[in-house]
Image (spheres, helix red, strand yellow):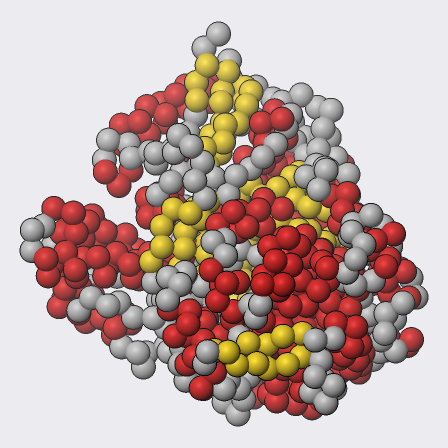
Amino acid sequence: MNTTRVSAAALLLLAQLGGGCATTSGTSTAPTAALDSATVLAVQQLETAAAADAAAPVSAPLPTAPAFQVVMEQFADLRILRYQVPGFETLEPRQKELLYYLYEAALSGRDIIYDQNYKHNLRVRRTLEAVWQANEERRTASTNQQQIDQATKFATYAKRVWFSNGIHHHYSTRKFLPECTPAYFKELIFATDPKQLPLEPGESVTKFLATMTPILFDPNVAPKRVNQEAGKDLVKTSANNFYEGLTQTEVEAYYRKKINRQDPQPISYGLNSKLVKDKQNRITERTWRTEGMYGRALSKVVFWLQKAAAIAETPEQQLALQKLIEFYQTGDLKKWDEYNIAWVHDTHSRTDVVNGFIEVYGDPLGYRASYESVVSFKDLEATKRIQAIGDEAQWFEDNSPIKPEHKKKNVIGITAKVITTVVEAGDAAPNTPIGINLPNASWIRKEHGSKSVNLGNIVDAYGAADAGGMLDEFAFDDAEKQRARQYAGLAGKLHTDMHEVIGHASGQLNKGVGTPKETLKSYASALEEARADLVALYYLPDAKLVQLGVLPAGGEVARAEYDQYIRNGLLTQLVRLQLGETVEEAHMRNRQMVARWAFEKGQKDKVIERLTRDGNTYFRVNDYEKLRGLFGQLLRELQRITSEGDYAAGKALIETYGVKVDPALHKEVLARYQKLNIAPYSGFIQPRLVPVVQDGTITDVKLEYPTDFSQQMLEYGRRYRLLPAYN
């Protein structure tokens, strides 16, 4: 038999020519379809072309490490890691093929997140890709130390742009600048073939350079991607590409007219569009769909989703994928709701995918969502832990400290699982979540349920990369350190499980109250993350978890998590801020607000104590039982704020406890942290899926682990270049 290993590049080229793997629709019992002879020939020709292309330095196949290594490199404030995909080789060939199609669909939307983050990002990225080779020649072959230094600084900048999907920091959303000089950047531009540069029609290299230099080097051009500063126009002062020519007042007025707060099943207004003013000064939405904005990329996403739907594992999975395809084709947000409902009801498939415009953290007003995708399959053994919690969701709701009228009387449809991640894309990569609870629409969660997942292999990779230096520096005593070393791993997993499964899925809005993005506005995300955190924190010491068999008796696991949460919220997360900055990212605001509120409210009883030793500051939990009571009180208040839509109270909590930073403490923390030489942020090189074709049929899919972050980013830039520089 003739066996051919077909590269992902070859199959993508085949898809662009209109060919590909012929499949038959149906459930998991249908056989994998064979490729016709013309298709096989085309695949072989494309594979030959791909092999020839591999001779070029920028197109060379990425090497695979002989022994698995998690930490690959560190630069700026970032570490690049890798994660393994255990169990992939045991999947059925059909499941692997399905995952391959979902993998290609995920990566086909990569250009979208760059454009969403900032309208010049795609042009910036393609400029970096174009000059990368010229810069590498200077960095590796030059004997001029000054030139080597400039080239190294430029390479670091390029990698930061790739990591953040644009020129703004992925977490703080502040613009970061190249440390090389504008003069060096100019040298690179003129050392590059103009045909490789992303020039606009009729644009000279000189004009191109004049346009791009301030975009990269001027700190006053687009300084913040997402501005959350109280009192500012959050639309005009945010550099994201969700609005154009509008003020915050105009956007809010536009949606006040459109949204009916009495609608029990509201669509996610604004989720998949850019809001602009047309030539007649009328406000209009540019919808993201196959025949609209981002059409070229979304058409390719749909192409691969159609292949996946044709070999879906179950009828429920097939229906969900078909609804997602319809959503991308029409842009109809009712189709998005139909997709989410179908996706929630797909509970028996081993494989799964998150794909769409999902999280709204990138929009200061919380309407528009960023593209992301997570392709995965269920970890059957690890799922037993999280499913045990999900199965008792009604018990947790009934026994919550929130007001009775804010509790769900019938918690339904919570599917909880630990997943093994295969690939992530868009806003989920290179930096990734560790837990997911979807869908976001509260009425769908209430009426149809939700899916809560823990990204098991991602969590394991983070654990393997942890050197422990932060614990040694910021934990108060040996007892706290020992407790963390023994129990923090399980504590973190249980916290994530409960945050997603019974946190986000708990509580309900009062009748007639709008969604949190309408009522709580720019504070909605931080308040929701705090609410979910508090559910997990409140229940971690509960005997119910011991009864369920997911927690050992004794209370040490909960104590380890309480220690860590307070230590992080009051101390260690400050390493993510530059001196003088305030807290703006939603998750950081959430953690600081919860920790500072508990510290202040428990001061009389010294529930949490601030201590100083050898000039260093520490926070020690003295009374874990009283701290649990404080967490319960704050949870009750946050649920009231959410259920009633109390904007003033929500704003007061975040602004009082979650935003401001003690400058003296911040300076101390940064000085202590600098000694550790640990980057505060991590992200991942993604695995690569490579199909195997035998006698015209995809018989297997091989998994590879690339080792070079820059080469993967260059490869993605070539392979998934589907959008123009400006959209």
Instruction: Give me the residue at 79% from left, 63% from top.
Output: 541
User: Residue 300 location in percent, x, y?
Assistant: 49, 45
Determine whether 312 is above or below 562 in the image: above
Instruction: Give me the residue at 30% from left, 78% from top.
Output: 219
Quadrant position of residue 570? bottom right
Residue most extreme to the left: 144
Determine whether 697 is above or below 424 in the image: above
Residue 246 in view here:
no
- Total residue callouts: 0
Instruction: Give me the residue at 73% from left, 67% from top.
Output: 537
Quadrant position of residue 94? top right
Instruction: Give me the residue at 13% from left, 51% from top.
Output: 138
User: Residue 352 location in percent, x, y?
Assistant: 66, 42
User: Residue 23 location in percent, x, y?
Assistant: 60, 27
- Taking depth in this image into account, of 65 and 51 the one nearest to the observer is 65
Q: Is residue 553 left or right of residue 517?
A: right
- Taking depth in this image into account, of 182 and 205 the one nearest to the observer is 182
Quadrant position of residue 359? bottom right
Q: Specify the quadrant that holds the C terminus.
A: bottom left
User: Residue 50 location in percent, x, y?
Assistant: 33, 30
Residue 396 in view here:
yes
